[in-house]
Image (cartoon, rainbow, N blue to C red):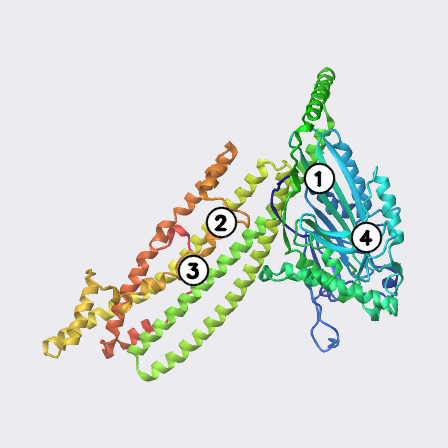
Amino acid sequence: VATMASDVCSHVKVIVRVRPPNDSEKRENCRNVVQVVDNHMLIFDPKEEDASGFGSQRGRNRNINKRANKDLKFVFDHVFGETSTQVDIFESTTKGVLDGLMNGFNCTVFAYGATGAGKTHTMLGAQNEPGVMYRTMTDLFKRMDDAKEEKEFAVAFSYLEVYNEQIRDLLANVGPLAVREDGSKGVVVQGLTLHQPKSAEHILEALDSGNRNRTQHPTDMNATSSRSHAVFQIYLRQQDKTASLNPNVCVAKMSLIDLAGSERASATNAKGARLREGANINRSLLALGNVINALADPKSKKAHIPYRDSKLTRLLKDSLGGNCRTVMIANVSPSSKSYDDTHNTLKYANRAKEIKSSLKSNVVSLDSHIGQYAVICEKQRQEILQLKKKLKDYEEKNMVPGTFNTISSQKQAEFKRVSEALQQIFLSRTQIRREQLDLERQLKENELRQRYSEEDNLQVQHFCAKEKTEKATCKHERKIASLRTQQQHICKRLKEAETRFLENDGWLHRVENEMKLLKSNDQTPEVLEKELHCHRLQLQVNDLQQHIKQMVALTTLQDQENKRMQKMLDILLPEYSRHYSALHGAGLVTGADERENYELEHLVLRERGVVWADQEGVGGIGLHSELAPVLSFSHLLYHQSSPCSKLSYSSYIYFCFCSFSMQMFCLGIIYKIGECLQNYVGIIMIIYIIDYTSFLHVMISLLLTDCRKDGEISQWMNLCRPVKVENVTRNNSSISIFP
């Protein structure tokens, strides 16, 4: 037996359903603590608007005993409000998962939440409003019926419950069952009965019978409280009808799980057996929460996952982090009466989004025995005759199959949904990148201003009198403190932006995995993949444009500093020359003075000299290497465009030019980059500005230590003071780099 597996990285898909308020909550006039914003976002414990319409009042009328609103925002794969129907839930959860089941992927859908939150209603439903389990069985048999001419199907199912940490078969009157782990089958329940249905109605009858056997007892919180975790599993085996010596057999499993709700003894007033049941329920759900936390934590990839802490977590081992495509339906109550339960459910659901699993299609290739060759040949001959008959009927009646149009429309709807998701993700991604680069520009400007302030203070120390030096030092220290406070604030905002960027990475990763799953079913068109690459290229162009603006701003700042230093040199050099001539004529020049004059003359004439390797950085020569990191391009330009992208640049070019439409797009991108590069003339001059800065710093450090002419002190003092640099907006083409 040879296994044929295609790996797909998948996240747990999290759906949140907010149930309507019940009669008890309406009578008590409970506050609504869940606000559904849109199909993907909700706010827990939102801020209350003031009745006057002018916002909240902060004054003496404020109730200090009232708890402040948390106003927590949560984003999930889908959020359903109080008006959602059972059909809406099925369409967004199990219907998409059934595609994976038909392709050989293991699937799990489980409902999670506190007692009374609506889990059993979502999974089982009522006679007039059937839930996820009923609709799943109906849709599965419909799909099998549509594909019966191409494939042979075999279905089996089981139904069990976990009650007081014991496993019971709901379809057979047997004692507690044991859980075992098999190397090839994974987690199995020893002694669990498997039933082979003949139709969907047979499964639904068995499901109804098992629900009657399920343990339910009323509590103060829920009159029909489920006291056990129910696990309904369907095993699907499919094989192509095409006769072959090596037929491919696909075996997959779907688990539909209705978890018991977490509860507090004080709220349910449970005693005796009910109290023990509640304790076991909470213990198993706590173990499930610990498993979710461990799997969602990126630091605990190699850490121990506590699956064995509960029978429930052992059964869900394959569903959480294993070879399984998992959907979590988090049911919550909107009432303030269930404030803590709703908050905890949303926190665990938010953590579950980060759980990843590696999916493998369970397709095996079976080698036939030589004795079956004659039978296989006969089947192939019969199949050829059937195909010839179908082809003849088609040619005679010239019929146009309407099913293809239906399938095509379904595919188009799925492609449109993925395309819109890509567009929204990259729109948000572009905004976050723009904010990151702008914050990085502010950070670099802050570093430059700190550097200029330090250099200005050093010049004041070299030149000015003591009383003016002390005053300038105090001013310098206040400025440095203010700049460092700004720097901390910018770093904090930059870290928040990086966190949002990582969250965006996660959503993009999910969409890319959906595309892979569609591709495994030969459904992904080239348009989607090309659209993804177009978004990546556009993101790189936006980064490049932002970098150019960043470099122009930093260059302008550096140029203003150079102008100030050049003006100081214009005053200092003539005065130094007169002083040196007077000293030389009087014969008062020392050897040190001659060496300094020689070095200064060497710099003025811009003569090249020999510098040994161990002399790098002496006397300001190392300014280039110190200033270059501040003026360098951002690391974000080289950030991976998307989590799953591993294409090289040559692969991009080959892929993008594979069609005429993509040729035109790439030409547009290249033209846009060409427009950006027109401004690079000014950007490249940054190298000369850095060298020019090195030259000015060395000359001024020499001149300020020697020149002390009283008549020029006031003018030199004004130049030594730091210049306040305002934000200057100029066109890129008209910026003057040099004086």
Using a 10 Å C-alpha cutoff, classify the residue at mark 2 as few (fewer than 14 neighbours), some (14 to 19) or many (20 or more): some
| Mark 2 touches mark 3? (CB < 8 Å) | no
Which mark, residue 542?
2
Q: Quadrant of residue 552?
A: bottom left
Counting residues from the start of the chain, the first of labels 2 and 3 encountered is 2
Tag 3 near tag 4, CB within 8 Å: no
Q: Residues within 10 Å of mark 4 (few under 14, many from 20)?
A: many
Of marks 1 and 4, the one in the foreground: 4
**Closer to us: 310 or 579:** 310
* Quadrant including the N terminus: top right
Res 573 → quadrant:
bottom left
The alpha-carbon separation of the residues under discs 1 and 2 comes to 42 Å
Cα separation, mark 3 vs mark 1, equals: 62 Å
Instruction: Tell me residue 414's x, y (percent).
Output: 67, 40
- Nearest the camera: 641 or 435? 641
Tell us which disc is closer to us: 3 or 1: 1
Q: CA distance from mark 1 to mark 4?
A: 24 Å
Q: Which quadrant of the view contains residue 695?
A: bottom left
Dot 1 crowding, Cα within 10 Å, few <14, some 14–19, many 20+: many
Q: Percent from the top left, x then y, of residue 405?
A: 70, 30
Q: Amino acid at mark 3?
A: Val
Residue for point 87% across, 58% down: 215
Q: Which mark is residue 102?
A: 1
Asked whether the residues under the numbered discs 1 and 2 touch, taking CB atoms below 8 Å apart as contact, a structural biologist would say no
The dot on residue 728 is 3
